[in-house]
Image (spheres, helix red, strand yellow):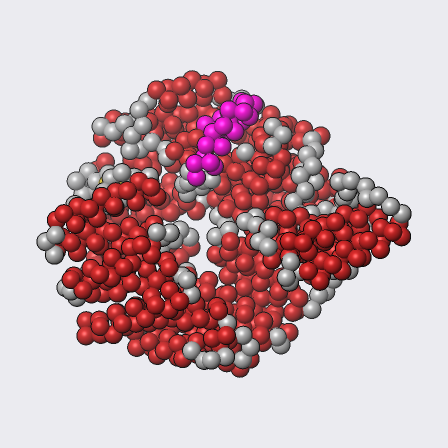
């Protein structure tokens, strides 16, 4: 055996621990297990399989989860010393409850199998001498899933009486499972109370709050909380859509679309996720939920006139086994019949396993949804807008007044935007009352632009909505452009989820009209911004890439550069090595176009930072100094944004030089102080404090605490609005004072640390750095 093989597997385990959940992580886990098994390194195979248990549970691979669990339990029972319950942060006891849930998910496993798993869990927990909260949670979960709701209620009472312990569900998951029970019992109010706790307290876990948002959709609708349900759908679908293990969440979003008049969006979601039915063959509970919900959505779509529309992904080869072969494509109408039939068969299998008709009754409840409707528009619809009050005067007089007010708004927009907005608002009301859609659209757009200038983002959104409504109702050209403006306004107003819907609606209109590549590129760019605002990094990346490709096709190099910069910024923020190639291309493109100097300066700055992060100091310093030269160009410095970027480049250069070694500390400190002065000049106090803090850290790290002290004292008042950096500064002050043997000053700084922690972080405990 290769003497370095254990180290090689250990390196793989370390990579696994730092990798995000997903296919790449799974490749590493499988490689570690294969090597350990081949060379009979069972302890390392045990450690790798504990990681597989966690990964398979998160990504939905029930077969791998159950196999790994059985292997680990067998090894532990045979030799607890070689194969302990806990290896690092992975604990075999933790996964017992996941196995109970996995067995519940398929009728292939009998009630006896489920009960045996619960009994084995109890034996293992009692033998280990740990708390039993997770055991009661598993019993409660099993009873709820089997439709034994009266028994589940009794078990919930037992669970509440059991003290929480290290193996309890987290605060989010315990509330989510209880909420699901209350919904099943028809107690929407109790379930929503728990959902609101999860959402208002920002409780999170691997599947939360996505699961809570999905589960609350119909209860919110039934409770009259239509806007809350709308927001829950927009946010929840985005959080659920990337993991195939989230089938049951997707089912709830399909139901929402079916009962709110959003059948077209529901069909898009179904097309996107129908293939997930092939992902985990043992997740039959998820399959049943999606099939039943699909039956509701498809029937609603037939009723809305889309019965002959083709559902393309239903013909995927992987779905033949489930749906059957078909020579022609599946229409919405035909697929409705088939998915209902498959759902009924699967429900019967679950009912036979559970000994009741719970799942069949849930199917009937789904069919009843077709008699339910809630008016919850997602994209802005073409609906008439009624003026708050009818303007007084004849038609000619009113048209003249509206035109005059609009002209005044245009004249005042630059110097008197408040008056301009008032004029535009009044002109819009008159135009709406007159039914003059063309004038209403142009006036609403003017009002939206003026409101944006004033920072009144909510008002801008409403004016953009008016433009979209009037254009859609009058079938005027430009509706797609107005929707893009509305989407951008919503993003500025902090409503990126809704903004995404409007941008996607605009994209659909543009594609249907055969819009040129340049127009599509701008739409994809805006979509990338909206998705990025929702922390959907993958979606933003893909949208920016589409924007770059389309702009390049259109030959619009200025736009290609701008979109490429956004992509490069995103990739850099995610520490993606592709950022180097993207940013290098943006720099070259910016040099060729010589448009906005900020684009070139920003691209070079980002490229330098990426090189420092990935390639090394020497290349990074060269690029950063070139960025500094570009930012110092007299023409470029006419742009205040370039002046600010100049200060940021100095700060980055100071960090890069500081990483070059102790012999360049003084040079790095000088650059950091120069950056601080540049930030002060543009009234960026927080960034100035950050640069001074860097200079102090460089000196302190070189054992020059006495020189670091005045820089820390200078930085402290500048960081009042940057609590995290202020805390770092104060902690450094404590450390420096202690090394300088000034205990009274150290105690005073430590007291300030406590106050900052209390004021900004709600924690009275001093952090470890203070001893």
**Residue 146 visible to the viewer:** no
Magenta stretch in the rendered image: 177-202
Q: Nearest the camera: 385 or 234?
A: 385
x and y, in percent, of residue 332 in the image: 71, 45
Q: Residue at x 67, y 54 (%)?
A: 419
User: Can you give x and y, in whole percent of width and height, for residue 386 in the image?
Assistant: 77, 41
- Which residue lies at the image location 34% right of the left edge and 20% below the top edge? 161
Q: Position of residue 165 (x, y in %)?
A: 29, 30
Residue furthest out toward the left? 741
Q: Front-most of 9 and 704?
A: 704
Quadrant of the image occupied by residue 83: top left
Give the answer, above or below, for where 7 lies relative to 245: below
Q: Quadrant of the N terminus?
A: bottom left
* Residue at the bottom extreme, as displayed: 592
Could you tell me which quadrant the C terminus lies in? top left
| Residue 191 part of the magenta-drawn span | yes
């Amino acid at each position: 055996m290769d003497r370095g093989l254990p180290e090689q597997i250990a390196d793989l385990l370390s990579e696994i621990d730092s990798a995000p959940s997903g296919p790449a992580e799974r490749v590493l886990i499988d490689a570690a297990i294969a090597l350990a098994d081949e060379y009979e390194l069972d302890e390392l195979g045990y450690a790798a399989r504990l990681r597989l248990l966690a990964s398979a549970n998160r990504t939905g691979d029930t077969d791998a989860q159950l196999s790994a669990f059985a292997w680990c339990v067998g090894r532990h029972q045979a030799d607890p010393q070689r194969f302990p319950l806990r290896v690092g942060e992975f604990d075999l006891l933790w996964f017992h409850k996941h196995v109970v849930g996995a067995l519940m998910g398929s009728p292939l496993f009998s009630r006896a199998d489920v009960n045996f798993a619960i009994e084995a869990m109890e034996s293992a927990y009692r033998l280990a001498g740990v708390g039993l909260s997770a055991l009661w949670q598993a019993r409660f979960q099993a009873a709820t899933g089997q439709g034994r709701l009266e028994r589940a209620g009794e078990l919930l009472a037992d669970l509440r009486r059991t003290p929480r312990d290290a193996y309890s569900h987290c605060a989010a998951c315990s509330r989510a499972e209880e909420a699901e029970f209350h919904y099943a019992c028809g107690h929407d109010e109790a379930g929503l109370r728990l959902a609101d706790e999860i959402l208002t307290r920002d409780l999170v876990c691997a599947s939360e709050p996505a699961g809570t948002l999905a589960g609350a959709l119909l209860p919110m609708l039934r409770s009259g909380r239509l806007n809350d349900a709308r927001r829950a759908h927009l946010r929840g679908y985005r959080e659920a859509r990337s993991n195939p293990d989230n089938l049951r969440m997707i089912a709830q979003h399909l139901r929402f679309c079916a009962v709110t008049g959003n059948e077209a969006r529901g069909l898009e979601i179904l097309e996107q996720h129908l293939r997930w039915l092939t992902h985990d063959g043992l997740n039959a509970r998820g399959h049943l939920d999606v099939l039943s919900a699909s039956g509701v959505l498809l029937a609603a779509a037939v009723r809305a006139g889309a019965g002959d529309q083709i559902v393309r992904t239903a013909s995927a080869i992987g779905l033949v086994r489930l749906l059957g072969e078909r020579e022609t494509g599946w229409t919405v109408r035909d697929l409705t019949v088939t998915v209902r039939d498959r759902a009924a068969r699967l429900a019967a299998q679950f009912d036979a396993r559970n000994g009741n008709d719970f799942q069949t009754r849930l199917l009937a409840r789904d069919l009843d949804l077709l008699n339910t409707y809630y008016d919850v528009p997602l994209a802005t619809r073409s609906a008439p807008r009624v003026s708050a009050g009818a303007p007084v005067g004849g038609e000619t007089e009113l048209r003249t007044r509206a035109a005059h007010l609009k002209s005044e708004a245009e004249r005042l927009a630059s110097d008197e935007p408040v008056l301009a907005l008032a004029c535009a608002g009044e002109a819009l009301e008159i135009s709406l009352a007159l039914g003059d859609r063309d004038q209403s659209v142009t006036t609403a757009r003017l009002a939206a632009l003026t409101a944006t200038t004033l920072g009144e983002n909510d008002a801008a959104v409403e004016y953009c909505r008016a433009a979209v409504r009037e254009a859609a109702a009058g079938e005027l050209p430009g509706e797609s452009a107005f929707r893009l403006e509305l989407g951008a306004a919503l993003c500025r107003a902090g409503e990126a989820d809704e903004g995404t819907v409007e941008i996607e609606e605009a994209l659909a209109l543009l594609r249907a009209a055969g819009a040129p590549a340049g127009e599509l590129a701008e739409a994809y760019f805006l979509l990338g911004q909206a998705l990025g605002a929702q922390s959907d990094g993958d979606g933003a990346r893909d949208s920016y890439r589409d924007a770059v490709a389309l702009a390049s096709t259109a030959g619009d190099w200025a736009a290609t550069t701008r979109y490429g910069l956004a992509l490069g910024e995103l990739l850099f923020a995610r520490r993606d090595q592709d950022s180097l190639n993207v940013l290098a291309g943006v720099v070259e493109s910016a040099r060729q176009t010589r448009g906005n100097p900020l684009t070139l300066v920003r691209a070079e700055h980002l490229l330098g930072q990426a090189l420092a992060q990935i390639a090394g100091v020497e290349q990074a310093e060269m690029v950063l100094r070139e960025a500094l030269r570009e930012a110092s160009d007299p023409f470029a410095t006419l742009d205040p944004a370039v002046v600010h970027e100049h200060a940021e480049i100095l700060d980055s250069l100071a960090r890069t030089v500081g990483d070059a070694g102790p012999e360049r500390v003084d040079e790095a400190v000088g650059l950091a102080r120069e950056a601080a002065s540049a930030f002060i000049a543009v009234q960026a106090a927080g960034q100035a404090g950050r640069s001074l803090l860097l200079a102090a850290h460089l000196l302190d790290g070189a054992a020059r605490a006495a020189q670091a002290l005045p820089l820390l004292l200078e930085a402290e008042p500048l960081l009042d609005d940057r609590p995290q950096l202020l805390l770092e500064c104060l902690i450094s002050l404590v450390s420096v004072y202690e090394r300088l043997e000034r205990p009274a000053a150290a105690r005073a700084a430590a007291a300030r640390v406590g106050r900052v922690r209390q004021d900004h972080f709600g924690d009275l405990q001093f952090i470890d750095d203070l001893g």
